[in-house]
Amino acid sequence: MSNPRWYRSLYWRIALGLVAFLALMLAAEAGLFLWLTDKIAGSFPARSPRRLAVLVASDVGAALAANRNLDLEPYLHEQYGDALQTFVIIMDDGRTLSNHDDVPAALVEAVREEIEYLESLGARRFARRWGNASPRSDDPNAPQPEPPLDRGPDGRGGGPDLRGGGPGPLGGGFRARRGGREFAPILVAGMPVGRVVVLPGGPPFSRVLKTLGPRMAPVAGGVLIVGTALIAFIVFGPARRRLKDVQTATERLGGGDLSARAPESGGDEVAALARAFNKMAEELAIRARALESSDNARRQLLADVSHELMTPLTAMRGYIETLSMSELQLDTKTRERYLGIVTEETHRLEQIIGDLLDLARLEGGGTTIRHDRVDVAALFSRVSTRHERELAQRNIRLVQHVDPAAESVTGDRDRLEQALQNLAANALRHTPDAGAITLSSAATADGIVLSVCDTGPGIPPEHLPLIFDRFYKADASRKAAGGSGLGLSIVKTIVERHGGTISARNDGGAVFEIRLPA
């Protein structure tokens, strides 16, 4: 048997489906993890965007205070390149920096314009309240003006939240939240030199994937490979081996080995398949044995029929050829004797053919068996009348005994009479002169028993199991001539068609018992 193509194999389909399921499961878990990471990314390295703005502003201010010529761009990438949250630094000298290179320029320009707008708005409000006074003197001993209190149109506050001191309307203590953005000033020696703006919305998914993907890919690949290998060896390995055993048993059965069986271990579908296969194999073996037995019987029947038909035909041919020889001068008496032998052989041949046809009709179901009430005494009387002349000539007594509880049976009268006639004829052939034959009926718990007994030599025990076979004759022990060898086979078939059984035994002679259901 050729193996199927790999893409049509059940094992590959299951395996590929499992791999796809694991891949989808890992992708879903990875997406969930990245989504959660994206949600909490703003808390690193600070708990909130506002704290991140203050932290970055303080750190950058301290770095610039230590080194006024510090190159901020590599510094930001080195210190905050791993932070997923995006922030922008807008310096007063016009430089615009960020911890990531993927910040759109339009967004940076919008942030710059917003900062400039807030500063101009704060400066106008400061000038309306304090005139042209400087908002804060460089002399720490000089009196310092109070910072402006920004109020909205309703007098309850609004606009940018200005807190702290320092020169300019957005003094050194300025921290504001606008449009979701967090602002914090960068101070160097108490003077603002720039602004830190933390952008809202968290980091983009592409950045999270770029940052975490290289770390997660080997882990996900390892989990996929290990999980697939484990499932392949633990789940599909045993199933594949057991299915292979079923396939092997099937090939052996197809090759003629009727003893091929598949292992039935396990309680899953593979075990159910193996049990169904073994049941089918057992039924095929039974049928094969039955067919073999039937074929042997058919061959034996053909051989027996050929032999039985050839015997009278050979005798007839020999005598006819002798009678047709013109050179032989046969007297009338010899000629008549030869013709008598030919006539007898013709009758014998006719009897054999008739018995064969009768047996074939009975075994093939071509004859309908009636179920009528049949009087047993009347059956015995017809049997006695049929053989009355031979019984008288040989001085053989025919005894009839009918039990009052077994005076009738249910069946086909003609066929039951045929069976009894055959048994009586068989007993008559093997009963010596001055002997006796007994026909009797008796009632039992499960039906009626009809018996035919004789006072002959009986049947040798080794022949008892074979006497109902076609053409069987125990000639070695029962030397009487005649008969086709089919009588007892016909009797057995008739009894079985009536739902009964027949048996033979020895008890002072041969005893045949027909057991019919009540």
Image: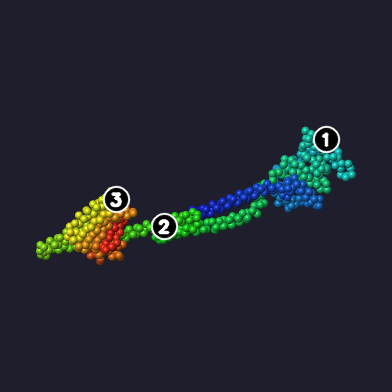
Q: Is residue 248 left or right of residue 514?
A: right
Which tag is nearer the camera, tag 2 or tag 1? 2
From this viewpoint, which residue is outermost toward the front? 404
Q: Nearer the viewer, residue 298 or 128?
A: 298
Dot 3, crowdedness within 10 Å: few (<14), some or many (≥20)? some
Question: What residue do we see at 63% from left, 48% from top?
Answer: 32
Question: What residue do we see at 58% from left, 56% from top?
Answer: 227
Dot label at residue 128: 1
- The amino acid type of the residue labelled 3 equals Thr
| Marks 3 and 1 close (CB-CB < 8 Å) | no
Dot label at residue 150: none
Dot label at residue 410: 3
Give the CA separation, mark 3 to mark 1.
Answer: 134 Å
User: Which residue has dot 2 on it?
Assistant: 281
- The amino acid type of the residue labelled 1 equals Arg
Q: Position of residue 323 (x, y in %)?
A: 13, 62
From this viewpoint, which residue is outermost toward the top? 154
Q: Position of residue 265 (x, y in %)?
A: 49, 58
Badge 1 element: helix
Q: Nearer the viewer, residue 305 or 249?
A: 305
Badge 3 element: strand
Question: What residue do we see at 32% from left, 51% from top?
Answer: 518
From this viewpoint, which residue is outermost toward the right? 141
Q: Position of residue 53 (x, y in %)?
A: 75, 46
- Is residue 13 visible in the rendered image? The answer is yes
Q: Is residue 159 left or right of residue 9?
A: right
